[in-house]
Amino acid sequence: MDSGEIFGISGHSGSGKSTLLRLLCRLEEPTEGEIDFEGKTQSSIPPQELRRKVTLVFQTPVLMGNTVAEDLVLGLGLSQPSSKPAIRDEEWGKETLRKVHLSPAFLSENPKKLSVGEAQRVALARAMAIKPRVLLLDEPTSALDLSSKQAIEATLKEAAASGMSIILVSHDPRQIQELAPRGLELSRGEMLRKW
């Protein structure tokens, strides 16, 4: 996979798309074979170190802070403790939310009160703030309306243009076709085709 590339993965429910993403960031280990990352076997890289470079955003967002600002800082603190901004660093928080087209007013919101679509965007913002080399996305726009979906797609294009590689799982053929010049389709854990 090239730097700054958006690579698509498609397939029906249960085809193995989410499992593949979990394998790529070592939330699951392969039962056979090896996965290489940056010239090393993935199993030789400590999981926490790998996840700083390969970050997964789940389809169902997991937010843990008391405010959106806390949640954004939590992700950065876990991955890069030395560069963790203060929770009250509003300019950093506003810029982080702007990238996913959310109002700065969300910084003080309780994450538990967000819609699924809003929570998805906060989770994406938190992951992008880590500045991973590879961003793994499992249906990042599944709960969004059309305008929000288009905004996130624009954000992904910007991230790729800045050099971040993205692996995008999507059920939306239009989205895959528009964003991912290369990819593969899975069926029952096997590659059905590639493009």
Image (spheres, grey):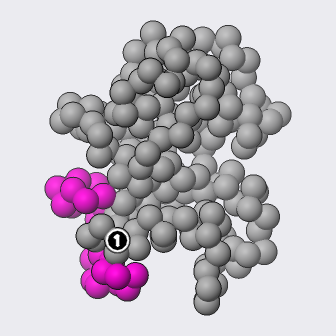
- Residue 38, horizontal then vertical, whole percent: 66, 70
Q: Amino acid at mark 1?
A: Gly
- Residue 24, horizontal then vertical, whole percent: 57, 68
Compared to 145, does 18 lie above or below? Answer: below
| Magenta part of the chain | 170-195
- Residue 39, horizontal then vertical, whole percent: 68, 76
In the rendered structure, the answer to whether residue 30 lies left or right of residue 5 reads right
- Residue 12, horizontal then vertical, whole percent: 26, 70
| Residue carrying label 1 | 14
Residue drawn at (33%, 38%), measured in percent from left and top?
152
In the rendered structure, the answer to whether residue 11 lies left or right of residue 103 reads left
Camera sees residue 8:
yes
Residue 64 or residue 6, whichever sits in front: 64
Image quarter (top left, top right, bottom left or bottom right) of the C terminus = bottom left
Residue drawn at (27%, 83%), measured in percent from left and top?
193
Density class for disc 1 (Cα within 10 Å; few <14, some 14-19, many ≥20) is few
